[in-house]
Image (spheres, rainbow, N blue to C red):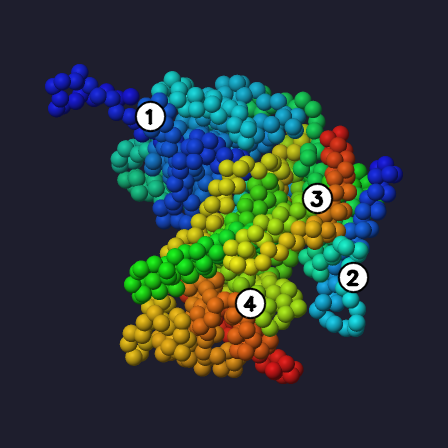
Amino acid sequence: MIPLPLVSSGSVVRVLHIIGGKGVYRKLHELGISVGSRLRVINSWGAGPVVIETLNANNDLRTSRVAIGYGLAMKIYVEVIS
Amino acid sequence: MKTTLKIACMILSFFYVLFGLISLFNWVIGNFPLSNLNIIKIWIIDIPADLGYTLFMLTVGLLLIYGAFTKEILSISCLFIGSLLALSGMALQIIIAISNLIDAYIITLFGEQLAITLVNDLLRPEVVLGTACLPLLIISIQMIKEI
Amino acid sequence: MYKINCLGCRDCSGTVSIRRLIKIGVAGNPNVGKSIIFNELTGGRAWVGNWPGVTVEKKVGRLRIDSAEVEVVDLPGIYSLTAYSIDELIARNFIVEENPDIIIDIVNASNLERNLYLTISLLEMNVKVIIVLNMMDLAENLGYKIDHEKLSKILGVPVIPTIAIRKVGIGKLIEAIKLAINNKLHFKPLIIDYGPEVEEAINSIISVLHSEIKEKTKYDLRWLAIKLLEGDEHIIKEVKRLCISSKALDLAVDYRGKLRSKLGKDVEDYLIERRYQLISNILNEVLSIEKHVRLTFTDIIDAALLHRVVGIPIALSALYLVFRFAFEASLPLADLIDWFFGTFLYDIIYSSNLPSLLKSFLADGLITGLGTVLVFLPVIVFFFITLAILEDIGYMARVAYLVDKVMHKFGLTGRSIIPLIIGFGCNIPGVIATRTIMDENDRKVTALVAPLISCSARLPVYLVLAGALFLTYMGTVVLSMYIWSIILTLLVALILRKFVFKGISTGFIMELPEYTRPLLSSVLIKTWERTKRFLFKAGTVILIGIILIWLLSITGPSGYIGPQVFSDPALLENSWIGVIGHTLSFIFAPMNWGWRASAALLFGFVAKEIVVGSMALLFGVGEEQLSDVIVKQFTPLSAYAYMAFVLLYVPCIATLAAIRGELGLKYAIIAAIYELFLAYIVALSITLFGQFIGLG
């Protein structure tokens, strides 16, 4: 389980845990990111902001492309699937 | 990437970086008169002493190099953005040249002399090099369509 | 159409038809093309105001369909209908209070899963919804095939596929609205089955509400019950108000507890899950993937644009091009305006037969003042047009992402960069643009530091002073001012964030839209919205300010002096302006600016564009000879300190008004005061430092 910014570009991950209160949850949820969501990391600088695409539950197709700032991305803990 | 394309990128990149550095040099010279160095001017082409210009030229040069030496998507992307940026710079300078021309006439309303700088405005590195980037842009668009 | 009996006439047939006023709301997620469709429907016939009590923009337009006058209200972009954000509450209240006849829900066809969540939420409120399936081209590019007729059947509402940017499908949409108005369309209410346990809870609450509610309410009871179970704060207050006793509320709380243990999670989370499950089932029926498209054009070029090494240089180069275009290409227009006001009109006034006082007022006051400010109009328009184009194609979102890491170090987020960039053209629309920043603290800090951004109005002061005193180094000196501007903006933001507006930022998250062709109408509208702030300032604030200054110039402690002051600076010294100038020069004594330059600063409070012109006035010279006079009045050191002061001191009145509009009077005053202090300290430091190292 690692924070999102540390995942390398191209990986597909599943969100395991989100640190934060209801506000953080809602903000992420609105854009399709919640515990259990599958994401693909498109752009990651290591210790910086991240661009991910949210993936459809049934297949690997993108539903939207989201940029997440460093601070917020560090609150999202994921496991790498591929 | 085809070898001819690679070489073209490398050559153009070299010139962009070169002129960018010359611009930097000219700027430094202009602001810190260290010795009796003069502003560099290539033949009749004026090279502005402008930091933003330096940044612009170096960026295009960098993008073209990335275009030549990286792989797949990144390479096409850099080629596209690099040539697009180069052509935008050229287009901008042409627009500014035209607007300076118009301005020269408007100034006469104030009773000033007509002073046309058109040729000087157009003889700049980004204009000359920009035209060479046009085929690069077209090729890169072609490559994008193939995906 | 209504037919009523006419009561007075004997000649006509006895019936008269009046047009109805139909109300339509346009809802949808952000970035789905809502504005485009809104503009298509209202044809630009719209006016902008505020939703009552909040600073959220409300756009209303009109549309004529047959004999009905249709009012179209643009609702804020939202993802759901909870009570957690102002935007969502506005949309909800609009539906309940204003009882629209139809809600047009704009759905992004390439992201049905998320967009349909709002649709479902709307349908649960028992509203008549027409779904617009926009961005069909994008969906097609991604290989999606959507059976919109089936979707329509399942949801029980009309579904219109459109490509708003290319105006495809708009006609069908208007057709559908027409049919809906005339009650020729069927709308099936949507009842989601939440499972036996929850349904039981809902039904019990409904029956209690039935007996408890005092008066007839516009709310749908099932919806109320669901909201109570979710723990919706806003609804809880409403129900408390509507009911005789708290039976319904207590029952809801009771069920929330029971269901939590039965279901193993909060009711709210469970309901959200069920809704997404419904959506998933629906999508299984209507959505099929024809080809697996992994990469779009956007993905490809984003590889370079978001790259960790080249991304930022690209953004900076792009900004360099934007700045050059705005400031250099607009030159002929600026000179034209300068000639028109400064020479043409000026001469006409002075060669006319008007009384000399009036001549002076018009020529020296009004025309000159207006001219000095309007000279900047071309720069601002050019700047904002290019900015709007970059925004509309989607690039600015990438810029915000690229700078986020840097902004984070100073306590801001990438989102703040856009208002700040706008500020380089004119601070006023920059301050107003901070509205879009979600986080309260981020917004306040950004709005308070925005005036530190060097707007186009300050440029002439730099150019004239640097040109006169720094000659060949002029460009570098001007550049240094811009660099100071950026450094101080970031530093002050950091200080404010650390010591005043403490609290962790909620963070930056932004959807990155696909790159699209910019729409001319959208670009023009955006540019106009921002430019008009500047024009408004010119038209009102400056007018008043100029009149005031003119009055203070022709009168003095010894009484009326007369318009000769404008040609004889010795006389000017006796006017109120002179008095004020001398007082100020006392305060600025360490910087050695003299009373005239100090007085010019006062003019700058009205609008910084006027500083140069007023200095010319005070010295009694034309602007061309100003440089010669300045060389005698300033030294390079004092000029540099002066420029720094002009950069930092007090936002111009119009900017203060904008801050007051966004944050309130208190913050506007704070902004004025802290900037004054900052400017003084910086100018003083520069002077002392310069003298220390012997520049003198």
Chain holding disc 1: C
Asked whether the residues under the numbered discs 2 and 3 touch, taking CB atoms below 8 Å apart as contact, a structural biologist would say: no
User: Residue C464 got which mark?
Assistant: 4
Point out the residue furthest to the right here.
B3
SS class of the residue under badge 2? loop
Where is residue C144? Give x, y as percent. 63, 25
Question: Disc 2 vs disc 1: which is toward the camera?
Answer: 2
User: How far apart are labels 3 and 4 at the CA level?
Assistant: 33 Å
- The residue that disc 1 covers is C68
SS class of the residue under badge 3? helix
Asked whether the residues under the numbered discs 4 and 1 touch, taking CB atoms below 8 Å apart as contact, a structural biologist would say: no
SS class of the residue under badge 4? helix
Asked whether the residues under the numbered discs 2 and 1 touch, taking CB atoms below 8 Å apart as contact, a structural biologist would say: no
B6 to the left or right of B122: right
- The one nearer the camera, C87 or B114, is B114
Would you say residue C655 is visible in this rendering?
A: no
User: How far apart are labels 4 and 1 at the CA level?
Assistant: 60 Å
Q: Earlier in the sequence, mark 2 or mark 3?
A: 2
C610 to the left or right of C505: left
Q: Residue at x 46, y 40 (%)?
A: C76
Question: Disc 2 vs disc 3: which is toward the camera?
Answer: 2
Chain holding disc 3: B
Give the amino acid at mark 4.
Val
Give the amino acid at mark 3.
Leu
Question: Disc 1 vs disc 3: which is toward the camera?
Answer: 3
- The residue that disc 2 covers is B40
Chain holding disc 4: C
C29 to the left or right of C201: right
Asked whether the residues under the numbered discs 2 and 4 touch, taking CB atoms below 8 Å apart as contact, a structural biologist would say: no
Question: Disc 4 vs disc 1: which is toward the camera?
Answer: 4
- The residue that disc 3 covers is B87
